Image: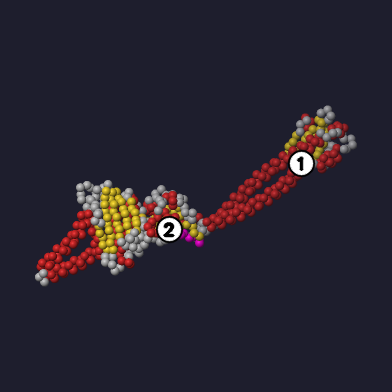
Amino acid sequence: MQRKGMTLSARILVATLGIIVVTMLVGLGLYSRLTSVANDDQAVEQARSVAVSLGDAPGLAELVVAGDPHHQLPGLGERVRRDSVASYVVIIDRSGIRYSHPNAALIGQRIEEPVVALDGVVRTGIDVGSLGRSANARAPIVDAGGRPVGEVSVGILESEVGVRFTQQMGDIALYTLLALGLGVVASLVLSRAITRATFDLEPAEIVALVQEREAMLHGIREGVLAVDTLGRLNVLNEEARRLLAIPAARLGQQPSDFLPEGQLRRIVAGEVNGPDLVVVTDENLLVLNRMPVIVAGRNIGWVVTIRDRTELEALVRQLDAVEGLTTALRAQEHEFANRLHVLSVLLELGEFDEAAGYSRRLQSETALASEDVRSRIGSPVIAALVIAKTAVAAERDVVIRVDPGSRLGHLEGDNMPVVTVLGNLVDNAVDAIAGDPASVGRHPRGTVTIALAHSEGSLRLVVTDDGPGIPADHLAEVFVDGFSTKEPRSGMRRGVGLALVHRLVTRCGGAITVGSTGGARFDVVLPLREREGVP
């Protein structure tokens, strides 16, 4: 993307400097105005003080009334002017004749304006006299009887006030320049910090990136969420809300604020690491990956991608089950073919009685196994599951037996929770035995025992095996999403079956426990309804 015009940092610098300059100029103007007024007021007050003091001086009134025969008043006025801040001190009688003045040529001359202090009132203000604009005060000269006999005019020229103002403004200008310099430094630091924070991107580029991000996040079929270095949520698309069932989650929250305790929260929070981590929710089987986000060499957070593998995993498991049944059927086909060959040979040899007996024995063995299961399990669906699992396990040289004490009547309602739980537990037990190196060479390699019982509206099923068992330090983890001690098989993800079982049992209001003594033992209690009167 091509950059046009000034960069963001340059604009920030110019804008900041402009604000500082305008602010300082306005402040300087206001300060200049206020200082000028204050200096004028101060000069007027000083002039008033000098005029009043001189007007009350002893003997001054007598000299003014006498017409200053010895010419003492010019020297008096000059001494007072030198000893004070006044620019001029003029002593005037009732008729307006000057008896002192900085300009000796004006002494004895009459003033142009009237003598205003003859009423006994001190007058102050800004005056434009013969010496220029000044802060002026006129105080009466009072004789011993209290009668005004003249006035004292004291002024401080604007040039004198301006000197002090110029000195003050020099300090203010120095302060202004210092503030401006600090503003320049602060602007440079701020612009550099913003440039670093935005990774040297210009506003148009940032807007484009935000638009592209929004389009990408809400246009993909995968869930995406991201957290910053403090663990706060700062990205969340709609697919992630749906998959995680967190419609009320808000940006800025911690994972603990919108995710329940469990494997999912630990993955998002970074407590569990690894590729393709499996999480089982109430509705979906999810695969999560948590990756750091590195920009300009800095870690600014982590992004978590969420893929829905519910349908794919179900298809893979169905395919695996079909392959298992196919293998079992193929093995049975071979076994049946061998038996038919035996019957065929017996018949060819004319051993008809022996062939009939052999046929009855085969029929008795097949019917006996099925009848044994049916006599203990009244539900056709569960009985069929046990028989099917028995055939599949036999192909792997594992025996599945139903505990002689098992009794289960026909069940009302949906049998699928029981089928799912029992099927997964049996599959895990068969896998554990078939995958145990210690069982190689034994025939059979091991036994899986199923115990079923019901009472007072609840079903209890126990699945035990004589395989290697579960290590004691892993007993607490067997129901955690993705946990498994076995290698993946046929593209299936391990660590899903027991997590699904645990979720299902818990959601149905039941309980499941695990133990390992001479093999694994899973004990499940499920609330069920039974149809009375059916054996």
Q: The residue under label 1 is which amino acid type?
A: Ile
In this orientation, which residue lies closer to the viewer: 496 or 9? 496
Q: Measuring 83% from the left and 28% from the top, which residue is drawn there?
A: 145
Give the image location of residue 272, x and y in percent: 43, 58
Looking at the rendering, the stretch of residues picked out in magenta corresponds to 290-297
Residues tagged 2 and 1 counted as in contact (Cβ below 8 A): no
Residue placed under numbered mark 2 in the picture: 272
Q: How many numbered marks does the figure carry?
A: 2
**Considering the numbered disc 2 on the image, is that residue within a helix, a strand or a loop?**
loop
Give the vertical position of 51 relative to 498 (above or below).
above
358 relative to 37 in the view: left or right: left
Q: The residue under label 2 is which amino acid type?
A: Val
Residue placed under numbered mark 1 in the picture: 156
Give the image location of residue 535, x and y in percent: 20, 50
360 relative to 395 in the view: left or right: left
Give the image location of residue 233, x and y in percent: 45, 52
Give the image location of residue 128, x and y in percent: 75, 40
**Considering the numbered disc 1 on the image, is that residue within a helix, a strand or a loop?**
strand
Q: Are there few (<14), some (14-19), or many (20+) residues within 10 Å of tag 2?
A: few
